[in-house]
Amino acid sequence: MISKGANFGTFVSVGVLVLCWVHFVECQDVGDYDQIDNPAVIPLITQIVYRRISNVTAVLSRQISNRSSFCVKDPEADWNEAFNFSSNLDFLTSCIQKTKGDVTRRLCTAAEMKFYFNSFFEKSETANYLRPNKNCNLTSWISGCEPGWACRVGPNEQVDLENSQDIPARTQSCQPCCEGFFCPHGLTCMIPCPSGSYCPQATLNKSTGVCEPYNYQLPPGQPNHTCGGANLWADVGSSSEVFCSAGSYCPTTVKSIPCSSGHYCRMGSTSEKRCFALTSCNPNTANQNMHAYGIMLIAALSTLLLIIYNCSDQVLTTRGRRRAKYREAAARSARETAKARQRWKSAKEAAKKHASGLQAHLSRTFSRKNDSSELEKLKMLTQSRSDTDDDLSISPHPSRSGVSRSSPVPTEGKKKEPTELMQIMHKIEEDPEGYEGFSIGAEDTNVGNVPKGKTINTHSQIFKYAYGQLEKEKAQLQDYKDLTFSGVVKMATNNEIRKRPLIEISFKDLTLTLKAINKHLLRCVTGKIRPGRITAVMGPSGAGKTTFLSALAGKAIGCNTTGLILINGKNTSIHSYKKIVGFVPQDDIVHGNLTVEENLWFSAKCRLSVDLPKADKVLVVERVIESLGLQTVRGSLVGTVEKRGISGGQRKRVNVGLEMVMEPSLLILDEPTSGLDSASSQLLLRALRREALEGVNICMVVHQPSYALFKMFDDLVLLAKGGLTVYHGPAKKVEEYFAGLGINVPDRVNPPDHFIDILEGIVATERSSGVSYDELPIRWMLHNGYSVPPEMRQSATGLAMSSMDENSNRETNSSGDDMMERSFVGEVWQDVKSTVDLHRDKIQLNFLKSKDLSNRRIPGLCLQYRYFLGRVGKQRLREARMQAVDYLILFLAGACLGSLSNVRDQTFGAGGYTYTVIAVSLLCKIAALRSFSLDRLHYWRECASGMSSLAYFLAKDTIDHFNTVIKPVVYLSMFYFFTNPRSRFADNYVVLVCLVYCVTGIAYALAISLEQGAAQLLSVLLPVVLTLIATRQQDSEFMKILAKLCYPRWALEALVTANAERYAGVWLITRCGSLLKTGYNLHNWNLCIIILTFIGVVSRAIAFFCMVTFQKK
């Protein structure tokens, strides 16, 4: 019976619940909720009211989504996160009971919520007050209009909570707002407090008359009016009392719980978060102390960088040591083989002499008949030894080479001496290539060509081949040292000396005139420089020697050029032969942070033919190193002004070697012996002499050579001031020519010094010869039958003529009176015009394209990029200390800014991020200037020689990407863990990587287009100025456009929006207000990343364009 009664009661209860639920859905009046005190019914009522609230917020999110799209990324998700109370509806149940079931008549409709939230998008100085509306205005102000109070709709009125158009009349039964809701000042309805807020009932502080914690006062003259609920939900600056306090979390809007130990609770939290390991979190703490993670990150990064740098340096050192070991072994083997070869030759000569001595001895001893028979045998024996050298092994008397002509019998003590020699000869005959790797006999046809049928891959084989060839070349040069007639013939017909493509340059009436001041630099220079000869260009200062070389090399700009320059008898441009023309500048432009061998190897790899085997390239480099006497310093750094390296003379020789390793056909050198002592100069000339043997056309400017050096020149071009030729011909005949003019060189005086003193006017020649120094150019013209310029014909006919400078001035300033009469403005205009013409000539020269006639296929873009990448990587490794200083400064900047910057939730850390953008931009930009500003001269030289500008630029940029990746980590390791923002570390890192990439490209453009001082100044000013423009209030349309052109604006927007996106719930209005004020958009994070990257790409394109356009050649 009891069981049946219980079942019947349960059935009745369920039936009542169902009937009440259905009845509740159909009704809205207070009288309809007659079961609100029933514990079984109230949860159902609560769920139905909550569904209606959810529907209202969903309608509201759709209504204001257009205006809030910039700050709400996903309206449905954001509003659901702000008003999702499904986990705990106790506050709603309490409100239903407090209002006796008419809570739906007190809730704000969609129209009232829209009216409230739209007020935040309107600029108003009274943000805490609403505009007059239907229920609260100047004529009607009931108690429900006061903050924290609300009223209900009349009993006979129907309320549609989802109505977003009309505000209903709500003026009856006003009472304090429920807990968990807020009732704005100027509205008579309730709005649920969002997640992360704390909205309890207010209490009156009788001493201040303020309802705490909401800080509103009771209306005067209404003693029955009490403190209500919350009155405002706005940004954190205006309604911080509604936000769940820092150090506590609010699981519901009516409950606040202090944060426990080992957890942290930020402001507006709905739950406590567990602190990470190794962090300290005391009770009621708002942030976890993450300094340990920053220290661990920087320690790990430092360890990684140390491993990378040390391992890379160790790899390079070990690799260099192994190469040196192979090289030394190969050199030692080659020297031993050369000695054996020399002993072999000596044995052959001794055998021949022994045979001749034996023949003479036998002819005196035996009869004529026997003598003639023996003589035939000896002749056959001698002929056989001379042709094949094989009969030496069967000689009955191998020690006869040491026998005296008067002694017919050899001594017993010398019989065993040739035995060892014969063993060496047999060994070499059996394996002629076993020592040095070069062929002997008919197979060895060309020096520098790998023997056919042999595969040379390993370093040991390559070095053996190279040093074997070098020893063989030394032996050949020793044979040709005396240069007898037979030696010259043999050298000329020797096929083992490889001939290069020949280039002969002839010039006629070559004249260069400065456009700006119409002044002659060269005048009527006629002659030719021939392959296989060394031509020296000499003259006093101002004679146009360097100008002459620049004209031959096609580098003269800012001048009007007249006359002819023929290449191999054809009127073609010298630029067509750029790949086989070497130009050694006057300054020693060598990479100081590379070794001697690395400098030479890089030039060889980029400029030698791509078809040349590696073994032959090694041979070329080793030959240059040995011929220039750089063996002892091959592994030493060249050095810079700050860091000591090799000596000045050695640096000069490396400067020349950079052009020699590319095996040029035309080699032009501008003062290669300046700064060298006599021994070094002769060493350099001997190396150039060996180049001339291969048909290289060598032309060089020299100052005051010694007499021994002067005799090593084949031809001489002697120029006077004004660029006029005084002599052009064989160097050994210059004294003879001047003697014909009555100018003799005094005893114990160096002829070149004497001639230059004459041309300088230091030594007078009028008394001894009757010829003044300014008549010498005309004498040369008349001597060779050249045409004399009209202004110089008066002197040519024997009339008196003033000095050459006066003649030049008379000619060049033919319109001098007009220039004197020209106004100041006219002179300025002329200077500007001349400067523009000069830059135009530079640009035309840089973009000049000529048909390649050199028949040499050098490495393409990809191969050169690979070579440049290796070189720049080595340079960066050797600049590790400088890189470490950059990282240390960034590390300190991150620590200082992270400690000092006030990261406010109201602005989502915008202040700290502003300092971050300035600091990272400034430091990374200054560091990036070094990439191109320090190597500008090296680039000009390498580009002029035909190397790829694009490969050079891409290699530099690629290596700098290492800093682009590492530097943000160094900075954030301090800044992020000191400020502890809500955004993820990855978001901040990605933004800073794009920022560093952007500013690095800008730094490239500044370093390439400006001088170093101006580039550094702009690198400091630009981040500060552009950030100020980007962060100032943009009132006008022009300022908005200008701000969008500044890269800091996009970096700041990305950093701030990434942080603001993490603020939800109660922070929704704060987020929208802050983003509205700054003009940022939550959807633009990807756009900001793209724009920063785009600016980096465009600035790099501009930098590359400036690099190839405004370079000097």
Image: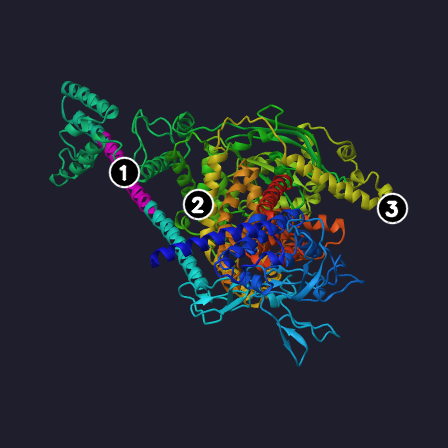
Residue at image location 81% in from the left, 62% down from the top: 139
What label sits on residue 598 in the rendered view? 2
Q: Secondary structure at mark 1?
A: helix
Label 2 neighbour load within 10 Å: few <14, some 14-19, many 20+: some
Q: Toward the viewer: 55 or 1006?
A: 55
Which is nearer the N-term, disc 2 or disc 3? 2
Q: Quadrant of the C terminus?
A: top right
Whether residue 18 sits left or right of residue 428 in the image: it is right
The amino acid at mark 1 is Thr
Evaluate if marks 2 and 3 touch, with contact meaning CB atoms under 8 Å apart: no
Whether residue 698 sits left or right of residue 846 in the image: it is left
Which is nearer the N-term, disc 3 or disc 1? 1
What label sits on residue 603 in the rendered view? none
Give the overall secondary structure of the magenta segment.
helix
Residue 596 spot, x, y in % from top left: 44, 47
Residue 347 on the magenta span:
yes
Q: Residue furthest front?
A: 1
Which is nearer the N-term, disc 2 or disc 1? 1
Q: Is residue 470 above or below residue 267?
A: above
Q: Please give the range of residues in magenta.
A: 324-352
